[in-house]
Structures are given as C-alpha cells and as structure tokens.
Image (cartoon, grey):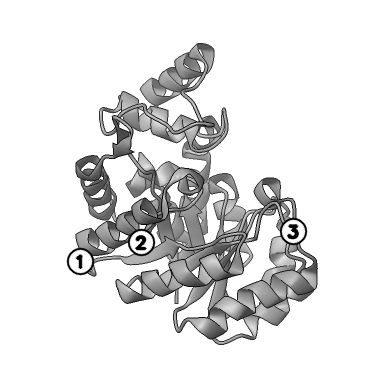
Amino acid sequence: MFSGAFTAIVTPFKDGRVDEEALKKLIRYNVDGGVSGLVPCGTTGESPTLSHEEHKRVIELTVTEVAGQVKVIAGTGSNSTDEAIELTRFARSVHADAGLMVTPYYNKPTQEGLFQHFSAVASAVDLPIVVYNIQARTAVNIENSTMERLSRIPNIVGVKEASGSILQMSEVIRLCGPDFDVLSGDDQMTFPLMALGGKGVISVVTNIVPHKMTALVQHVLDGNIEQARAVHFEIYELCQAMFIETNPIPIKAALALMGKVQMEYRLPLCPPAPANLDKLRTVLEKYQIL
C-alpha cells in the first residue's frame, strides 16, 4: 500500500503561528521533487507543541494542497488512546490516506498495552494505520512478536521502523510478510532496510533534497542496487548533518538557510548552537544546496 520516499514535513512558524504560506510552498517543493507522499504532524513537524486546532489544520491543509497527487500519511498518534482515536477520525474525515501512530510516550506501556492501544484505534477508525516504532523518543520498543500480532489487524498496514536495529527490522519483515509495509524511520538506514525487503522511508532529508532520496528508493524498487548504493553514499554525510542536534532542529535550520522557512521553533526546541549552525552551513555548501 505504501512504498517510496515520504517526507516527514516540518511545520513552519512565523511570529508564533503556523506559517501556512511557507508550508504550502514546502509541500509543492516536495511534490515537484517526486516524493511518494507527505507526513504532516510527525516528530519532524513538532507535533507535541501544536494545539489540537493547529494539528488538524496542518493535516487538512496538506491534504488540500497535494490534491491527490501524492499520498498523505497524517501523524495522529498520542500517548492517550482516546486522543489518538480523535485525531485519526479527523484525518479520515479530511481524506488523508493513512494515520501514522507513534508508540505511546511517557506512559511506558507493556507489550499487551501497546497491542491494545493500536488495536483500539484500528477498530474505532476505518483508516489504514502505519505504526511508528521509535524507542529513543518513547522509552518503549515494540517487540517483534507484538508487531506480528499487530500486522494481522487488517487496517494496520505497516510500520515506520526507527529502532536502529537492522536485526529487528529484518525479523519484522520476516514475521509480518510481504504485504506489511516496513518503512525506514532513519534516512541512513533506508538502503540497508530496503535491501532486506523494506518498502521505502519516511524521511527527514527529503525536506531539502526530495529528488535524491526519491532516486535512491526508486533504484531499489527497480532492482538497480548499484545505483541505489551510490546515492546512499552520495547523501550519507548530508543525512548525518540533519541529526547534528535533536530533530527537527537541523532540518528546519537548513530550510531557513535555504530561505524556505523562518528559523523559528517552539520551546523546548530552540535554534542550533552557533558552532553546529556553522557545521550545517558548511555541509549544505559542500552539497551546493545554498
């Protein structure tokens, strides 16, 4: 159902508000860059600091702006199951193609709690769901046996895998089968994951170079492994630079240096340290992005 390069799009701010015009231009830049879809209101979109009204508005604006040209996997996760259901219902009502649901954070649920959380949303809302597994942000890893159980629920169709473990990713692909879409949650892991049978990536770096990651993913899907490997190493340093500080600090700074958004964040996120901003600028100049 979902294969390709999907942009985890940033949420631009201006004077404390969502900068809708900048967001529309960024959406168009990514669509024109060939991405398979957009993911608004994820971690990269600073979703924890968006009000419910802003969250819903960003999803609706994204769906409207792409006008069916690419798919929209809307961030609808929460550490409250009821809230996740509400956001997922909204995403369905505005015709998003799927909901991206992060593992509940802070609560630190058991594996059974995780299963019940995702299955409750899946049974409440008739919308495809992509699970987002990222222990580094949530304190809990979705174990492979739990992911296998979740994959048997008809509208849980895939996972954004950001566990950092290639062994776990390999086992998820083996256990869940070819119809379950395993997408990388880490740009640098895209090529090795796809070599194992992954379907693509929900990407940070595509915000600035959508054509590059799109080319890498398409090469693998077409069986052109040598070409994909070449692109992997070509953009490797750029991908590393996007995590010189906590995501989405570097990617939003990069977009600001490119003149596409304001370098504006919501606390507790803040602009990068001057030394890191200089390093980021150097990498962008090396790649002739500025």
Amino acid type for the residue under numbered disc 2:
Gly
Amino acid type for the residue under numbered disc 1:
Ala
Task: Name the quadrant of the N terminus.
Answer: bottom left
Which residue shows up at 69% across the image and 62% down it?
Answer: 169
Disc 2 versus disc 3: nearer the observer: 3
The image position of residue 22, as x and y in percent, is 23, 40
Left or right of 108 in this view: 219? left
Tell me the element at label 1. loop
Tell me the element at label 2. strand
Residue 238 seen: no
Tell me the residue that label 1 is attached to: 67
* Residue 263 found in image quarter: top left
Give the camera-side residue of 83 and 196. Answer: 83
Left or right of 255 in this view: 178? right
* Residue 5 found in image quarter: bottom left
Tell me the residue that label 2 is attached to: 37
Tell me the residue that label 3 is attached to: 141
The image position of residue 19, as x and y in percent, is 26, 40
* Mark found first going from the N terminus, 2 or 3: 2
Disc 3/disc 1 C-alpha distance (Å): 35 Å
Tell me the element at label 3. loop
Residue 16, above or below 201: above
* Mark found first going from the N terminus, 3 or 1: 1
The image position of residue 15, as x and y in percent, is 29, 29
Which residue shows up at 53% across the image and 40% down it?
Answer: 233
